[in-house]
């Protein structure tokens, strides 16, 4: 009974270790996409960011709404 539990715990530790190794060292870059007076629409922002930089775009409300694109920095 104890042997399967130990195997499961070891597998979980192994998988978590692999996931941390993959994400370690990955740096994120950010760029501001301005749409002028049109404002920021979430779907357009995300689509532009994904197509140009393969990232995730998010509308941020400030004095004028802007699209902030977060993507993996090139090496």
Image (cartoon, rainbow, N blue to C red):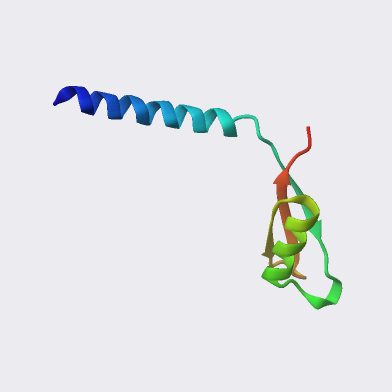
Q: Position of residue 75 (x, y in %)?
A: 78, 32
Residue farthest toward the right in the current orientation of the protein: 36
Provide residue 58's location: percent of width, then percent of height. 67, 61
Q: Identify whether 46 is placed above or below 3.
A: below
Provide residue 56's location: percent of width, then percent of height: 67, 55
Q: Is residue 50 above or below residue 11?
A: below
**x then y, percent, for residue 38:** 81, 77
Residue drawn at 43 percent across, 31 percent down:
15
Residue 11, by quadrant, is: top left
Tell me the quarter of the picture where residue 22 sits: top right
Relative to 17, 47 lies left or right? right
- Residue at (69% x, 36% y) in the render: 27
Q: Give the quarter of the image for residue 26.
A: top right
Judging depth in this view, the residue of 47 and 59 nearest the camera is 47
Task: Indicate the quadrant containing the N terminus: top left, top right, bottom left or bottom right.
Answer: top left
Side (left or right) of 2 relative to 35: left
Q: How many marks?
A: 0
Q: Is residue 48 left or right of residue 25?
A: right
**Residue at the image position 71 percent from the left and 73 percent from the top:** 41
Which residue appears farthest toward the bottom when viewing the image?
38
- The residue sitting at 72% across, 47% down in the picture is 71
Q: Is residue 54 above or below residue 28?
A: below
């Amino acid at each position: 009974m104890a042997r399967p539990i130990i195997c499961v715990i070891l597998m979980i530790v192994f998988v978590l270790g692999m996931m941390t190794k993959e994400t370690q060292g990955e740096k994120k870059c950010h760029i501001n996409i301005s749409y002028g007076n049109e404002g920021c629409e979430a779907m357009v922002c995300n689509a532009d960011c994904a197509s140009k930089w393969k990232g995730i775009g998010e509308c941020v409300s400030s004095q004028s709404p802007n699209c902030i694109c977060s993507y993996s920095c090139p090496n």
